[in-house]
Image: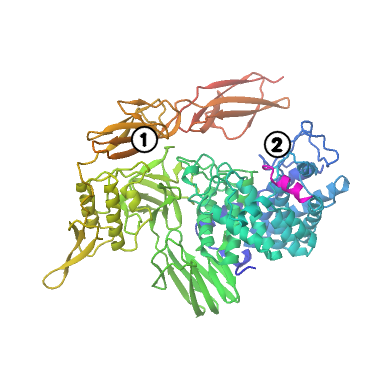
């Protein structure tokens, strides 16, 4: 069913570039992290020696000291069974996949040796569990007992159990990777036994019972079990494995997708994305088009309407309403696991359809979210990746994530960047991503040389004879791309096709312009990301409120932004410094900015006219640049005329102001005119603008004259009010007001003034209005003049006057140690950091529970918390007891 296939990892070598940075850092971890630590939770569960190894930690930790590997028959029951770390084993599956992927990419013997060591360790555990005779099938393998699976069948909730089939999928996927990428027959033998055990459990259940299981929040999360069972079927030919894959389906989601209904709002994103990967495999295995149609429909419901600028999706792991991005920017956006799976789907859909939009998404998400999710550091113990890659104002990337789900997918992501660069079909070669790489193909190699995304020059050098088609992806933003010096339009397919007899030494040169552009959120054209070519840029700023920018005076004809400078990978423009989303940095940043031009302006000219807004937030500038830019200056002039007439008839421009805007638009240099331009106003009519070129006596062009016309009824009357919303009070460096502010609505000309907070009711605006509410608000003002014309203005304000609440919990750990956990809560701006110290230490930033050794005398530990607004709680103390 696939029209083009990606190349095997061993066939593509990454060369030096943006992606190789994270690859090298993750390969280091793969080489040095001990396999014994990854196997520790499995060995402890099977009562095998752990060789003194500690597990990786957090979610991948030992269970409760009193927990046992219960079968479904001897489980003590909820509220009785002592349990902990119920997802353990998942991280080990990812680690095995990382080792296998890394070996396939590099051929390093140390990685093959560690893969074999880990597979052998899992086989030993499987045999030990089977020897007990307690489980339903000797193929059972987990780092806990079989009881979680039977409790899921009894519809146990999250809390009693934690996604047992999710963990099963990670282990099986790791074993399948070990078989397919390193040739481990032992891995195939283990995973085949697991497959028989899985099939035995799910095929005996009624469909209705399965649907109730999978509908359970998190408890029913099964990862990509359908993908894994199809893979196993493809390898072994066992029919029951394909039937078992069909048991891992959520009928309500599939049915809705095929019927064109969107039911995703409020659903757990990564509970459902992995199954879409499996549905495409099921389509390949069965030919049932329902699977493919459902995945395509669901993709269209997610991308772009539920994806942020860097390609991530969701908030707190949940999807929001359809076509809502600006309205869904919160504190915990964009789980990295979800993007990992979206990339798998995009890769498969591109192979099935050859539609360039899937490759475009893959570039956006792989470059900005996945590469940017890896800290630019080298670690012996941690993947140093993000759980969430947040998009809220003043966000901070919180790396590390050992043992979490995103820590696990992060292990894999950074050792397989080359998987979506090149695709092939008979007589066809596709360059889908411009990542520096060497492709081993047929009897030679093809080398892709580039500094992309740092610049747009790409050279593809052939070291072989190839007669056929070379397909080069042209990103949708790359208007004016050139192939071998010839300008090439962006085709509908997203790819330009070269049909040639390529010979060794032939070089194809691709030049992609790298425009700096503002990309609006689909649900709010005033909330924008700044993007340079494929790179999403992050504004460095310590504020935690949305940053305003005035961009109109910087826009070129095509909507791109003029006047930026670079210093290495940093970009300076619009009065701010930006870094790439792929930097792996640790500065506080802003992915989205607020367009807030107080006056109408064009590149090279400004009429000095306010950009007034109506009740719906529309203004001349928002209307003019709603579609991003213009193909030619004639289209620009037509749009200026249209929006001026609309603004004037809406009471937002007087006639004199409308004329001033038209004159400024004519004089603008946004298109780099060959000769100066000026505007004139002709007879009153609704005719479109006309451009006349004046020449000298010898026929040389001297000047272009733009003749505008304005209907007689446009902008009549006195000048309109200019209304402003001013906030009084001191604003902290965070951008928040940490003392109760007030606000006032003013106008430079006589008018009736009113004010409102958010969607509240309008009230007369006389003097300063107290703003005694905590949170983020839009303050609104409106002015009505004597002719009944109404002008609106808004101002965002963020108020948090209270510090976080913070408390300490101390738990004994044996006779000589305690575990200290510091809890902080702030439901307004959110907790920024928790700090603690003892008399002999400096203030430290709290990250996780920590252990303190008891002493002969009591110890005093001080702690405090600071929110994102900058409020700090009073210092509190907890006394640790002395040694007993």
- What element does badge 2 sit on? loop
Q: Is residue 157 visible?
A: yes
Looking at the image, tell me whether mark 1 or mark 2 is earlier in sequence order: 2
**Labelled disc at residue 143:** none
- Seen in the image, is 700 located left or right of residue 594? left
Quarter of the N terminus within the rendering: bottom right
In magenta stretch: residue 207: yes
- Disc 1: which residue: 780
Q: Is residue 145 visible?
A: no
| Overall secondary structure of the magenta section | helix
Of residues 245 and 482, the one drawn nearer to the viewer in this rendering: 245
Q: Residue at x 30, y 39 (%)?
A: 790
Whether 834 is drawn above or below 586: the answer is: above
- Return the x and y of residue 689 as percentages of the image width and height: 24, 60
Quarter of the C terminus within the rendering: top right
Q: Which residues are magenta?
A: 206-218
- Disc 2: which residue: 159
Of circles 1 and 2, the one toward us is 1
In magenta stretch: residue 56: no
Looking at the image, the residue that sits furthest to the left is: 697
Determine the image quadrant of residue 720: top left
- Return the x and y of residue 382 as percentages of the image width and height: 61, 45
């Amino acid at each position: 069913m696939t029209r083009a296939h990606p190349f095997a990892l061993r066939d593509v070598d990454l060369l030096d570039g943006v992606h190789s940075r994270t690859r090298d850092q993750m390969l280091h971890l793969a080489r040095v992290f001990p396999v014994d630590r990854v196997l520790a939770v499995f060995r402890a569960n099977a009562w095998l020696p752990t060789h003194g190894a500690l597990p990786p930690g957090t979610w991948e930790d030992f269970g409760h000291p009193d927990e046992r590997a219960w079968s479904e028959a001897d489980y003590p029951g909820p509220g009785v069974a002592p349990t902990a770390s119920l997802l353990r084993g998942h991280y080990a599956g990812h680690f095995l996949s990382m080792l296998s992927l890394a070996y396939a990419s590099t051929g390093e013997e140390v990685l093959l040796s560690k893969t074999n060591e880990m597979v052998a360790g899992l086989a030993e555990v499987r045999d030990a569990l089977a020897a007990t005779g307690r489980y339903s099938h000797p193929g059972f393998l987990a780092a806990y007992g079989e009881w979680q699976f039977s409790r899921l069948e009894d519809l146990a909730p999250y809390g009693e159990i934690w996604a047992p089939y999710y963990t099963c999928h990670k282990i099986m996927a790791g074993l399948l990777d070990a078989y397919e990428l390193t040739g481990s027959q032992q891995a195939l033998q283990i995973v085949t036994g697991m497959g028989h055990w899985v099939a035995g459990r799910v095929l005996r259940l009624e469909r209705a019972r399965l649907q109730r299981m999978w509908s359970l929040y998190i408890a029913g999360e099964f990862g990509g079990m359908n993908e894994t069972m199809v893979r196993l079927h493809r390898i072994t030919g066992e029919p029951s494995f394909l039937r078992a894959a069909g048991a891992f389906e959520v009928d309500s989601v599939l049915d809705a997708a095929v019927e064109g209904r969107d039911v995703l709002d409020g659903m757990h994103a990564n509970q459902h994305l992995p199954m879409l990967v499996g549905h495409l495999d099921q389509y390949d295995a069965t030919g049932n088009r329902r699977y493919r149609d459902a995945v395509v429909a669901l993709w269209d419901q997610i991308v772009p309407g539920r994806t942020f600028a860097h390609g991530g999706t969701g908030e707190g792991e949940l999807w929001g309403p359809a076509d809502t991005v600006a309205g869904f920017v919160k504190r915990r956006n964009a789980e990295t696991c979800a993007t990992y799976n979206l990339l798998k789907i995009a890769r498969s859909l591109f192979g099935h359809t050859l539609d360039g939009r899937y490759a475009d998404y893959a570039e956006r998400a792989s470059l900005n979210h996945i590469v940017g999710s890896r800290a630019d550091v080298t670690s012996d113990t941690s993947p140093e990746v993000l759980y969430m890659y947040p998009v809220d104002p003043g966000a901070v990337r919180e790396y590390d994530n050992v043992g979490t789900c995103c820590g696990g997918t992060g292990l894999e992501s950074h050792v397989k960047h080359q998987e979506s660069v090149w695709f092939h079909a008979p007589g066809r070669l596709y360059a889908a991503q411009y990542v520096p790489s060497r492709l081993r193909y047929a009897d030679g190699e093809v080398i892709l040389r580039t500094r992309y995304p740092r610049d747009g020059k790409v050279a593809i050098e052939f070291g072989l004879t190839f007669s056929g088609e070379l397909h080069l992806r042209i990103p949708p933003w790359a208007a004016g791309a050139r192939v071998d010096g010839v300008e090439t339009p962006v085709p509908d397919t997203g790819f330009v096709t070269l049909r040639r007899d390529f010979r060794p030494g032939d070089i194809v040169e691709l030049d992609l312009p790298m425009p700096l552009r503002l990309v609006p959120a689909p649900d709010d054209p005033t909330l924008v990301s700044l993007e340079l070519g494929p790179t999403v840029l992050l504004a460095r700023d310590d504020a935690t409120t949305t940053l305003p920018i005035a961009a109109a005076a910087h826009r070129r004809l095509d909507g791109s932004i003029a006047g930026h400078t670079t210093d290495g990978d940093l970009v300076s423009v619009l009065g701010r410094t930006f870094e790439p989303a792929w930097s792996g940095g640790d500065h506080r940043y802003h992915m989205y900015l607020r367009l807030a031009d107080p006056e109408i302006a064009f590149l090279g000219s400004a009429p000095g006219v306010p950009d007034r807004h109506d009740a719906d937030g529309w203004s001349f500038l928002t209307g003019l640049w709603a579609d991003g830019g213009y193909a030619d200056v004639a289209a620009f002039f037509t749009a200026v005329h249209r929006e001026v007439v609309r603004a004037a008839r809406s009471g937002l421009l007087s006639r004199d102001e409308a004329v001033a805007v038209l004159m400024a638009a004519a004089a603008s240099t946004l298109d780099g005119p060959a000769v100066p331009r000026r505007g004139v106003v002709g007879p009153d009519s609704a005719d479109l603008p006309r451009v006349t070129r004046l020449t000298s006596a010898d026929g040389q062009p001297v000047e272009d004259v733009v003749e505008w016309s304005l209907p007689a009824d446009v902008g009549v009357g006195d000048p309109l009010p200019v209304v402003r919303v001013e906030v009084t009070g001191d604003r902290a460096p965070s951008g928040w007001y940490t003392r109760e502010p007030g606000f006032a609505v003013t106008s430079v000309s006589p008018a009736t003034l009113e004010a409102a907070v958010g969607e509240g009711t309008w009230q007369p605006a006389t003097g300063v209005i107290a703003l005694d509410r905590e949170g983020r608000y839009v303050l609104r003002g409106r002015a009505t003049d004597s002719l009944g014309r109404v002008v609106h203005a808004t101002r965002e304000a963020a108020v948090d006057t209270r510090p976080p609440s913070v408390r300490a919990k101390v738990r004994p750990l044996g006779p000589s140690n305690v575990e200290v956990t510091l809890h902080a809560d702030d439901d307004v701006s959110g907790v920024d950091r928790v700090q603690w110290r003892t008399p002999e230490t400096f203030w430290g930033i709290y990250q996780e529970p920590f252990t303190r050794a008891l002493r002969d005398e009591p110890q005093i530990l001080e702690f405090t918390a600071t929110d994102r607004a900058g409020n700090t709680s009073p210092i509190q103390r907890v006394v640790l007891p002395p040694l007993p």
